[in-house]
Image (tube, grey):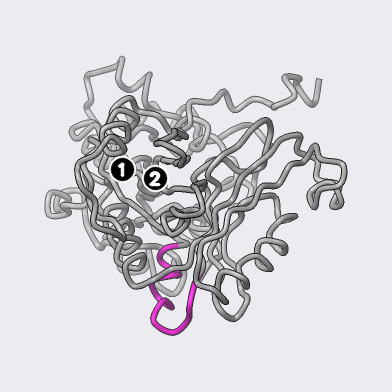
Amino acid sequence: MLNSHSHFSLLELYLSQCEKLDWVLATIVNKAGSSYRSPGAIMLVNSLGQSHGLVSGGCLEANIILHAKKVFDNQQAHYVEYDMLEEDGYAAELGVGCKGKIGVLLQYVTAKHQAVLANLFQRMQNGAMSYLQQTFSAQESAKPSLNELSLFDNKGSLVMATFEQQESEEHRISKQIITAGNNHCNFMIGQSELSISKISAPTNLWVFGGGSDAAPLVSMATQMGWRVTVVDHRSSYARPSVFKHAAEIFRAHPNDFSQIKQFQQLDAAVLMTHNLNLDAAWLKLLHKHQVAKYIGLLGPLERRGNVESLSEISDKQWLEKNINGPVGLDIGGELPESIALSILAQCHSVLHHRSGLALSGQFING
């Protein structure tokens, strides 16, 4: 199992081991200033002291594991703040470079938490967006509420919770936050402070073409927590022994593609069959369904023109807007691994509406 830091892969790992070990769920519930991870990021610690996921750049995790031991001992939630500006704080002792503050809530995972997390995982598998709500600050008499966990859908309806929940002011505010489309929000109810965070489904990348050069692309994408589907009808391609980390491998020709219902769960596609007619046929289907937010086409500009011509797609505006070909960013890649890096960097920037330029704002080789 790859140690990815996405909710999907972390929950997949947890659910595969939850019956054997006890667990603590650590969640970033608030943030001020700069930090490595954002609110909603999670980390899981088991009763053997093993941790999965990151809530920082790797510098705070050891201390979180120490706090988790206390949670295991008393089975009560615990909230801890890390202030990177505090001169005598734990973060300052480590020389953490971020200039901000994060609050981390550690919750003891009960059978009810397991049910909520399993439901969240199922929703992510189905491509649904969800919201997790937690209370991280409360008066002494309300301290048990710190171990509560609520799951909402993207319309603000309660899906499941670790406690009996009635219609309330808290629920009304939660629904307002969710319907407003916020990624994260903290709010007060009486003397209690709550956090609600959006949990998106994993990115679904479909790779059309199962040659050996596609293997690094699939491997890197799964390390990022993406779900990857490989499609190829040719018997000597898309071998399970090569694509061990692919979520699905479909033996399908473009003519039989209507049989694959999961096609609706497709965020990004890369065409790399190394066959003009096959790439053209897959491109035609992608145009027909128009669900992909990113389409990459392997090969030079001349090949792109040939593929587009064979696809018989008359919508030139769609082709110009949606096809990234030659695929990838110009990083000088030649080997399959560096080409995969180039493709994924471009795909990631498109899906997250970023420029793909240097963060410094400068052209590095200028």
Q: Position of residue 144 (x, y in %)?
A: 43, 59
Q: In the rendered structure, does residue 13 fall within the stretch colored magenta?
A: yes
Q: Where is residue 83 in the image (x, y as percent from the top left)?
A: 74, 42
Residue under pointer 2: 199
Asked if the residues shown at circle 1 and circle 2 are in contact, with their CB atoms under 8 angstroms apart, the answer is yes
Q: In which quarter of the image is residue 279?
A: top left
Q: Earlier in the sequence, mark 1 or mark 2?
A: 1
Q: Which of 104/144 is in front?
A: 144
Q: Position of residue 89 (x, y in %)?
A: 81, 48
Numbered badge on residue 276: none
Amino acid type, label 2: Ile
* Residue 135 shows up from this direction: yes
Is residue 211 left or right of 115 when viewed as pictured? right
Q: Give the range drawn in magenta.
A: 11-23
The residue at 35%/57% (across/down) is 230
Q: In the rendered structure, does residue 202 fall within the stretch colored magenta?
A: no
Residue under pointer 1: 129
Whether residue 176 is situated above or below residue 16 in the rendered picture: above
Amino acid type, label 1: Met
Q: How packed is label 1: few (under 14 Cα within 10 Å), some, or many (20 or more)? A: some
Residue furthest bottom as drawn: 20
* CA gap, disc 1 and disc 2: 6 Å
* Residue 216 shows up from this direction: no
Is residue 48 left or right of 213 when viewed as pictured? right
Q: In which quarter of the image is residue 316?
A: top left
Q: Quadrant of the C terminus?
A: top right
The residue at 33%/24% (across/down) is 180
Whether residue 263 is situated above or below residue 64 in the rendered picture: above
